[in-house]
Structures are given as C-alpha cells and as structure tokens.
Image (cartoon, rainbow, N blue to C red):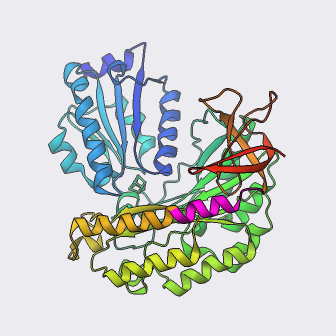
Amino acid sequence: MEEYENLSQAKDKRYFLETYGCQMNEYDSSLVAELLANRGFSPTSDPGAAQLILVNTCSVRDKAEETALEKLRSIAHHRRRDPSVRLGVLGCMAENRKETILERIPEVDILLGPDHYDRLGELLDHPDQKLSSALGPDIAQTYEGLFAAPPTGVQAFVAVQRGCDMKCSYCIVPTTRGPERSRPLRDVLEEVRRLVDKGVVEVMLLGQTVNAYRADDGNFGELLAALDKIPGLRRVRFMSPHPRYFTDNLCKTMADLPSVSRHMHIPLQSGSSRVLRSMRRQYSKDQFLRIAERLREHMPDVALTTDIIAGYPGETREEHLETMSVLDSVRFDAAYMFAYSPRPGTLSADMVETITETEKQARLAEIIELQRKHTYQRLDESVDSVEDVLLEGASRRNGSEWIGKTTHFRKVVLDPGPEAKAGQIVSTRILARRGQILWGERA
Ligand code: 5AD
Ligand code: SF4
C-alpha cells in the first residue's frame, strides 16, 4: 500500500502506453488515454520516466504475441528498479496468455482484458500487494458514456461494436474479446459529433463484424445514413466487415450515401470452398464471388481489399491454386496476406498441419507476388482520372508536397498550393504511379 501511495501522490503522474495489433486496439488505447487523462496522468514516450507502464497486446498470430512479450521483457527492469512503478498488460494477450505472461515477465502487476478498461482507475486506487486483474467477457460492456481521447489529425477511429459471434476455426478473437455487442447508435453519433467539432472529417467505424452492427436504436445501414447527415463529416470508412453481411439492401444504402467511402474490405481467407467450410466462414467460393460482384454492381468504381491466410491445415496445392484463381478473378486493390499461425484454444489448433513451414511460406510468397501485380494494375488504371483527395498532412520529404487519400483509400502525393490545410478535399488529376503511391496535381 505504502509503495502505491508514492504513485497516487506523485505530482508528475506519467504513463507510457505501447499498442500492438488491430485498429480496435488503437481505439481502446485512446479510451485508456482518456481515462488516465481524467485521473491527472499525462503520456510519455519514455518508459523510464513513467510510473505506469502499459502494453496493449494482440494475440492474432504467434509473431504478434512474441513481439509484445519481447517489449515487456525489455521494459520490465523499470519496474524492478523502482517499486512504485506499475507494469500492466492490456488487451487480447491479457485474456489469452495470462500464464505465459506471468511466467515470462513476473514483474507484471496489472492484467486487464478488453472489457475492463474502465476498471483501471479502481485498480490504481486499490492495489493488491500482488497481481491486480480484471478479465473475462462482459457482454454488457460497450463503454457507454465514455469517449476516446480525440486524435491529433483529421481522421479518427470509432468503435461501434465489440466482440465477435463468429466461430472461424483459426481465430482467437471470439475468445479474447467475447461475444458480439453493438454500442448504442446515439452514443456513436455523440462521439462522432464531438470529433467533428474538434476538426475530424473522416471516421473509421470499428467492429469485428462491423456490417452486422445492430443496436437497439438502429442497424448498420441506419447508422451510416445518420452519420451521412452530420455536417462537416466528409468520409466514413469501416473495418472489418464480414462478407455475408453485405446484403443487397446494405449495398444499395451505401451506394446512395456520398460520405461512405468507395472502398470495401471483404476478407476472403481462402478461395477453396472445402477450406472455407473447414474454416467455418459461412460462404462458399461462388457466394463470395457473387458478393464482390454485387458490391461492384452498386458501386462500379469501388476498391476491394481482402485478407488471405496461406497454408491452412490440410490445404492442398490445388486448393491453394484455387485461392490464386479467385485473386485473379476479383483482382483486389490490396490485400493483407498471412501465413497460417495456429492459436492455442481455437478449433483449428488441433488440426494437423500437413505442409512444411517452407511450403507454407512459398504459398504465401506466391500470393503476395500475384497480389502485387493486381495492386499495381489497379493503381495504373486510375492514372489520368480526376479524384477527390482528402489531405492528411504535409510530406516529410518535401514541404510543398502533401499526402492524401482518395475515397478508394489510394495514397496520393500532390502539391495543393500554399493555402492547403489538413482535412481539405482537393480535386486532383492522377498523373503517375511510383511503387504503391500515386502522384497527382490540382485538377
Ligand atoms: N493465422 C493467420 N492469420 C490469421 N488471421 C486471423 N487468425 C489468423 C491465424 N490464426 C488473419 C485473418 C483475419 C486477419 C485479421 O488476420 O486473415 O482476417
Ligand atoms: Fe489482435 Fe485480434 Fe485482438 Fe485485434 S482483436 S488485438 S487483431 S487478436
């Protein structure tokens, strides 16, 4: 207790917070930042200067876990040196890898799962001599009434849904983040209005199956329609949707809303119907192709991106080639591509991996190479077009150059002139592609 009082009475309350993983984790870290700001803490990028050291962790693949453990190991000496320092692990690994964390980094004295960030203050006020933790799913938790710390730029993440009810065989998220629940629509609107008041012009709505959003006061289409009416909000994106919730109705609604970006993420995972069944993805290859077509019917210029897992247990060479063939027929604008990583506690963790690590990496490399070709083709096809580019900030390389994005999420470099401001939308003629970046000029 006494050692803790040093902390609570410290005049200079500093915290260090490092975040790994997805955008939801980034958002959660800004929730934590807001909670800590309300308690008089200020951030520092130097863990040595902090009395509270927090790492927000990710469990999605083995590499993410190892990176976070490595980070924790490298900063644990601050806790050993100064007993008033507290070292906390937040996020998916706190839920999923408690034993490993405590075994490998015994200095850890706080563990908080994704549904318990609002208990951080309480843990700080009433510290145990040993470990303080709050873990497990809380189906009622939507952090109602709590608003994340606003970002410094013109874009912001807004969580609209937490948890996941899907049972994809490879995925740890339903275990770490609990069942699906939607945040009340009025809460989301309130948060977005506050952000717009602070200069935000683009929001990214977050949820594990975000297009399945269904609060008591509205569904996803209704949420998008309500956001479209907020003056000053120029663009709305969302991550990550599930293909099966892109209904005809939703596609039609989105096509009619000017603020909804012409970029849709549709995670394919595999192009083989047999593998998809084993993954429990709830669509076949043909159904997926139909959904991609539907999005393009409603929004002809939509950019499509996806996620692919290479080397799922039991995947044959032919099944891998089926994935390549779906990539060829859809020609995605971009993809996140991963080698399968067994996660203890998931359904597929018990399945025998039939290929060697070398073969898995070779399949991943083939997928990456094919996708790079498609990404370049897509970008080349946009050369000569005129696009609305939302300016994000001046380029670090050259003061008069700015970086912005089209509604398709394509990065564009241009010189918009001396009056340029972040958040402004500039009509831009695309002149050329260099690597994955487009170059343009004011149209
Ligand atoms: N191994 C490899 N990739 C995975 N993903 C999720 N779980 C795993 C796993 N066990 C990928 C999926 C998902 C993205 C966020 O991460 O492609 O869509
Ligand atoms: Fe990582 Fe998934 Fe947790 Fe996000 S939800 S932090 S991607 S495990």
Q: Please give the count of numbered marks on the rendered protein.
A: 0
Residue 25: percent from left, percent from top: 46, 47
In this rendering, the answer to whether 438 lies above or below 180 is above
Q: Return the residue found at the far right.
A: 443
Q: Is residue 374 magenta?
A: yes
Quarter, ligand 2: bottom left
Residue drawn at (76%, 68%) of the image: 255
Q: For the stretch drawn in magenta, what is the main secondary structure?
A: helix
Residue 241: percent from left, percent from top: 56, 66
Residue 170: percent from left, percent from top: 34, 69
Query: Which image quadrant is residue 324 in?
Result: bottom left
* Residue situated in front as seen by the camera: 413 or 269: 413
Q: Return the residue found at the far top.
A: 11
* Residue situated in front as seen by the camera: 62 or 372: 372
* Relative side of 157 to 259, left or right: left
Residue 311: percent from left, percent from top: 31, 71
* Relative side of 421 to 340, left or right: right
Task: Quadrant for the N terminus, please.
Answer: top left
Q: Which residues are magenta?
A: 373-384
In this rendering, the answer to whether 21 lies above or below 342 is above
* Residue situated in front as seen by the camera: 266 or 246: 266
Residue drawn at (53%, 76%) of the image: 328
Q: Is residue 215 visible?
A: no
Residue drawn at (34%, 63%) of the image: 172
* Relative side of 152 to 368, left or right: right
Q: Is residue 431 magenta?
A: no
Query: Which image quadrant is residue 89 in?
Result: top left
Q: Is residue 124 visible?
A: yes
